Amino acid sequence: MLDFFSISEKLSNLDENALLKCEDTFKSIESITQYNQLKVLRAFINNRVSESNFAPTTGYGYGDKGRDDLDKILAEILGAQDAIIRHTFASGTHTLTVALFGILRPGDKMLCVTGRPYDTLIGVLGCDEKVDGSLADFGVEYKEVALGTDGMPDLLAIEQAVKKENPEVVYIQRSRGYSLRPSLSIANIQKICETVRNTGSNAIIMVDNCYGEFVEKQEPTEVGADLMAGSLIKNPGGGIAPCGGYIAGRADLVEKCAFRMTAPGVGREVGASLGHNRELYMGIFNAPHVTGEALKSAVYASALFTEMGFGVTPAFDETRADIIQAILLERSDRLIAFCKGLQSGAPVDSHLTPEPWDMPGYDDQVIMAAGAFTLGSSIELSADAPLREPFAVWMQGGLNFHTARAGILMAAEEVLKCE
């Protein structure tokens, strides 16, 4: 590292200590990566992927074999009955919105059992204020169950809320968002699903699976979830998909979502791939490996900043449920310095300096470091945070551990300069 970048002797020593701490956790991550990578390979072989799958279509996109086969491949990988994966989903929030509007009807009730959802979904729900075109605007009622004092789902409160509210949809957010609560493991999600079903409820259990794909050997649709959705510029795009998202789960629910995605009665039969199939196939194929590299990057950052005396969540040796690493920097100048340093270690736009700004959908100014090949990609090394206490930064991604480590060290060096 010292051959290429200016790293202080103090930080170099901390780096060595952090790497030693990570060895056992890295071995565990590599075991999961191997399992998931072979699972993906099997799905490609089972579905006889060939060069013809990459051929572009235009216009309506009728008979796009590559598009349709990739749906089948993704469903097999995720352990779901069916799936749709499209480059036309603009973001994770857009994908989740399509899914929610697909399965909810006027007069229905949605119960979020993991506390307040991620900031950008609030407008979709219309739960804080009237937003034109929100679910509330269409007569969908929103309720939520607060997390327990430990930051985990309160199973007793969930059971009581399901019995009282009788919701049509029970919603689970797997990742922590801009909070310090733990992300949810597959085991946690399974317990929530069992709690809901033990009440006798037939509610659709939907999971926002963003940042969680390929982190464990199973996915939510294999442990009781009826539907889940995510973004392709996070884990499942493997750093190759330039945009898009996916929805997977019960076949009847996926069809409802497909009708909302395009038009009722038309659904998945239209939508030209425009030559993006190859990128989506390659992205899915590489996703388990890239997710493993992102996990190693997060573990390393956790170990390094622990050595530096900062609070972190998760801890470097803690079992992980997503690729996000939160670091409690305690002061705004450290937070800005971290993002500045991380940006300087990016392969793209390293010469730029991130600044806090008024980002749509957020109440506080937000700072982001993201020198990525794909704009906004969070499977590539990036960090972001609202400027509010406890001035924590949420870091995620890393196409490969070797360069991610360099970026993290450059972020750490800038933080040390604040002292």
Image (tube, rainbow, N blue to C red):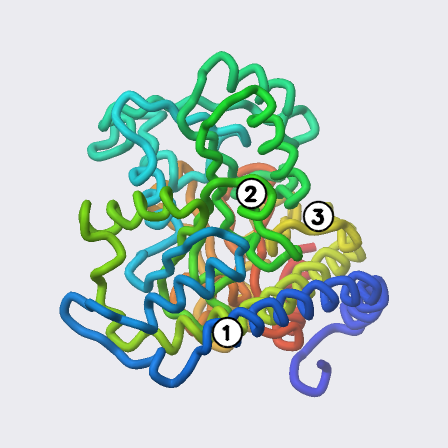
| Extreme residue in the left direction | 59
Mark 1, residue position:
44
How packed is label 2: few (under 14 Cα within 10 Å), some, or many (20 or more)? many
Mark 3, residue position:
314
Query: Eyeballing the image, is 284 above or below 137?
Result: below
For the residues marked 1 and 2, what is the alpha-carbon distance in whole angstroms?
27 Å
Find numbered disc 2 in the image and state the secondary structure of the residue it sits on: loop
Question: Does residue 81 show up?
Answer: yes
Q: Point out residue 383 in the picture as x, y percentages from the top left corner.
A: 53, 57
**In front: 147, or 274?**
274
Q: Amino acid at mark 2?
A: Arg
Q: Point out residue 239 in the picture as x, y percentages from the top left corner.
A: 48, 70
Q: Amino acid at mark 1?
A: Phe
Q: Quadrant of residue 213?
A: bottom right
For the residues marked 1 and 3, what is the alpha-carbon distance in whole angstroms?
34 Å
Name the N-terminal-most of marks 2 and 3: 2
Is the C terminus in the top left, top right, bottom left or bottom right quadrant?
bottom right
- Number of the label disc, if any, that sits on residue 174: 2
How packed is label 3: few (under 14 Cα within 10 Å), some, or many (20 or more)? many
Residue at the image point whose x is 80% and y is 73% from the top = 9
Name the N-terminal-most of marks 1 and 3: 1
For the residues marked 2 and 3, what is the alpha-carbon distance in whole angstroms?
14 Å
Q: Amino acid at mark 3?
A: Pro
**Is there a contact, CB below 8 Å, between mark 2 and mark 3?**
no
